[in-house]
Amino acid sequence: GNGYTNEYPTGRLLRDAKLYEIGAGTSEVRRMLIGRELFNQTA
């Protein structure tokens, strides 16, 4: 589905969420990383 394609930024974030879960640790850190990525894309 669209959630797992590279056509949309959200697809990449959803795909990478598992890597963040393994490498980044807590859900708070993951939220910070995803928020930073979204902010950088809009800036």
Image: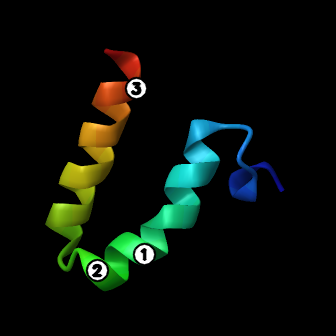
Tell me which label, 2 or 3, sits earlier in the chain. 2
Identify whether 30 is placed above or below 21.
above
- When asked about the image quadrant of residue 17, the answer is bottom left
Q: Going by the picture, which residue comes out furthest to the bottom?
A: 22
The answer to whether 12 appears left or right of 42 in the picture is right
- Direction from residue 32 to residue 39 in the image, left or right: right
Q: Looking at the image, do the residues carrying marks 2 and 3 touch, with CB atoms under 8 Å apart?
A: no
Question: Which residue type carries mark 1?
Answer: Leu
Is the Cβ of the residue at disc 3 closer than 8 Å to that at disc 1? no
> Helix or strand or loop: what does disc 3 sit on?
helix
Mark number, residue 19: 1
Mark 2 crowdedness (10 Å alpha carbons): few <14, some 14-19, many ≥20: few
Residue at mark 2: 23
Q: Which residue is mark 3?
A: 41
Tell me the element at label 1.
Answer: helix
- The kind of residue on which mark 2 rests is Gly
Q: Earlier in the sequence, mark 3 or mark 1?
A: 1
